[in-house]
Amino acid sequence: MKQACKLALAAAALATGVCAAPATASAQEIQITGPLAGAPAVRKLRLYREGRAELALGGGFTLLDEYKRTVFISGRLQYNVFDWLGIGVFGGFSPEALSLNTDLTDRIESTAPRNSRTAVNLPANRGQPAFDQQVGKLGWMATPQVTFSPFRGKLALFQKLFVDTDLYLHGGVAFVGVKERGDCGGGGQPACNVAASFQQVDRVAVAPSFGLGLTLYPSNFVSINLEYRAFPFSWNRGGFDSRGAGPDASFPDNRIDSEDRTFKFNQMIFVAAGFHLPTAPKVSE
């Protein structure tokens, strides 16, 4: 009798397990019928970019600078082939008055020692020339680029004011005008401890350019742009003899040349007002 009860309980448990086992999931395609069949996901969507040209004018400033903070008078000209894809060029220039010393530059000029050991890196007589005249500067930039705008929506201010907005990514090639301390200490060049060796020369650096931005559309014609841009390349920002000798050329060699350029992840912020033509955007079905 006891054995029969055990068999009955085992059979009941097995039956319960079979009933509780999960059934195989399957998906069923929902066929939309009626007036919504074949309808687009969004109707009457303002296409702020597609088929429109944009001129954005504003200012930019570099970030995380050691010796000089550069303020650019900048602009972007762009044509948007689709609402999500545009091609154009970004550019800007920085007058000498908008190349600003950092606190480090001022402190080096006022407190750094001047002796035979520092003569290659700093003029022997303070202020002849001043240290800020030898540090690297950014003069201008021109960047052909492509813009990709995958995200759009609305921003709300206090749940009262709603503004159409989109987030975009950009990438291209930057041509940057750089001023650096000229070469010295080599054959046919001035010694690096004379005043003439602290003069600057111009060159063009080529670098990748990429970043992201946010566009607000308070009206059909005018937009507001906030953009982040990175354009990394190597340059001699301090005008110092820091490399060129020893293992991996990682020690000073009493010369100033291309070996003294070090890599910098250059960055900037661009803020601008954009103007669009035609003045009214297309509207989807």
Image (cartoon, grey):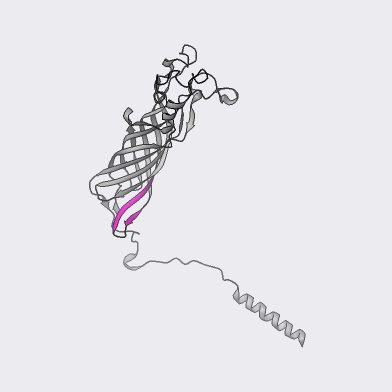
Q: Nearer the viewer, residue 92 or 55?
A: 92
Return the x and y of residue 170 as percentages of the image width and height: 39, 41
**Residue displayed at 30% across by 42% down:** 272
The range drawn in magenta is 152-170
> Going by the image, does 12 lie left or right of 253?
right
Residue 236 visible in the shown view = no
Which part of the image, by quadrant, shows the N terminus?
bottom right
Q: Residue 238's image quarter?
A: top left
Is residue 247 placed above or below 191 in the rendered structure?
Answer: below
Is residue 114 placed above or below 262 in the rendered structure?
Answer: above
Q: Residue 250's image quarter?
A: top right
Residue lying furthest left: 279
Q: Which of 50 and 183 is in front in this view?
A: 183
> Going by the image, does 259 lie left or right of 35?
right
Q: Which of 139 and 128 is in front in this view?
A: 128
Which part of the image, by quadrant, shows the C terminus?
bottom left
Return the x and y of residue 21 as percentages of the image width and height: 60, 72
Q: Residue 213's image quarter?
A: top left
**Residue displayed at 73% across by 82% down:** 7
